[in-house]
Image (cartoon, rainbow, N blue to C red):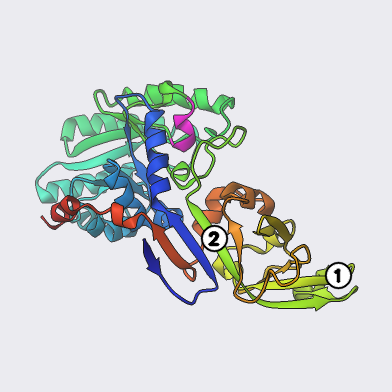
Amino acid sequence: MVNHGQFGGATLTVDLRAVRANYRLLRSRLRVSTLCAGVVKADGYGLGATYVSRALFAEGCRHFFVAHLDEGLALRPYLPRSAAIFILNGLPRGAERECAAAGLVPVLNSLEQAEAWADCAHQFKRSLPAVIQVDSGMNRLGLTAKDAAILAETHARMGAFDLRYIMSHLACADTPAHEANAMQLATFRRLATLFPDVPRSLANSSGIFLGPDYHFSLARPGSALYGVNPDPAAANPMQGVVRLTAKVIQLRNVQPGDCVGYGWDARARGEARLATLSFGYADGFHRAWGKGGAVFFEGLRLPVVGRVSMDSIVIDASAVAPGRLHPDSEVEVIGANQSVDDLASAAGTIGYEVLTGLGSRYRRIYLGAEESVPSAMLEDSLQ
């Protein structure tokens, strides 16, 4: 167990053993020939990319995806060279040499990015690894069909790239019956034929559960690794990874008609016992959570009262027996009684946003961290 921080108002516990178990489950759902990557962008979905990546590496993962070059450069020292790190958003102009020197692999999303990477390869006088992303219908990132055809012809002539994968991204995989899934699959297959014999990658977390037609050579799960349900319409097969508890810093009794919080948005209907917790929207809990949000104490649901503040939240603790709750008591925000998805639903958002919004002020505890850095890996990383 690794412990960061001592005096924070709330404690975030990240179970790396659960991350590894989720990776094993996802890998077991794939075809035997399909490799399973780990998407660790946004600092491992807010949970610590270095810890998560090393746990995944110990579980056998060798393909890691981040969004930005800075993320890849920050992660590179923590993983051995046998781990490939891919940059999903491609490279900003002028960053190609730094990317190549660090041994990172860009996902090329435009002809301009491809041209700049080819120029870099010529400067290094060797072929450089790359992934080509084609747009199969999401209209977010990737080459159009026209540009993909141009690049395919150019690449065949120049040979500047060592193409690792042709990839695309599914827009509606978390809705299995959505027509977009089959349409994107067909489009991806058609565009991928422009690059014969190059391995293919399409499935994200939810895409894995669409079946083997979507698996291809490499799957790229992200949110499911961290416990988010890959199919919101079904029971969640993933293990919870995070537990968040917050400290009570003050208790008070209020009378009928007393108002609570900014804007006096809440008014006591009767006598009540309120508790103030030491976290707020600066820690990733948006003000929208104040309407319908709750925490748990000894299995009791305690609703949020009034607006979420920057550093504090007020809850109605009237249901707790006198003397059971006191300053320094901890209540559960995420855990056995309330999953990440449950909390997201109460705030009108999704689990991704909850996790990636978690701030830096929490005291953080990593369970299983000591199991994630085998000595052989450390030796490899120093070579």
In primary-sequence order, the first of circles 2 and 1 is 2
Q: Dot 2: what SS?
A: strand
The image quadrant that residue 143 belongs to is top left
- Quadrant showing the N terminus: bottom left
Residue 106 visible at all: no
**Residue found 60% across the figure and 59% down from its top:** 333
- Quadrant showing the C terminus: bottom left
> Bounds of the magenta span?
204-210
Position of residue 227 relative to residue 301, above or below, is: above
Residue 197 image point, x, y percent: 24, 24
Badge 1, how many Cα within 10 Å: few under 14, some, many 20+?
some
Residue 213 image point, x, y percent: 42, 21
Image-based side of 308 in relation to 108, left or right: right
The image quadrant that residue 323 belongs to is bottom right
Frontmost residue, 308 versus 334: 334
Frontmost residue, 200 versus 152: 200
Query: Residues under labels 2 and 1: Cα distance?
Result: 28 Å
Q: Which amino acid does the dot numbered 2 rest on? A: Leu
**Residue found 24% across the figure and 36% down from its top:** 164
Residue 133 lies in the magenta-colored region:
no
Q: Dot 1: what SS?
A: loop
Q: Which amino acid does the dot numbered 1 rest on? A: Ala
Frontmost residue, 150 versus 69: 69
Q: Which residue is mark 2?
A: 244
Q: Which residue is mark 1?
A: 268
**Residue found 18% across the figure and 49% down from its top:** 81
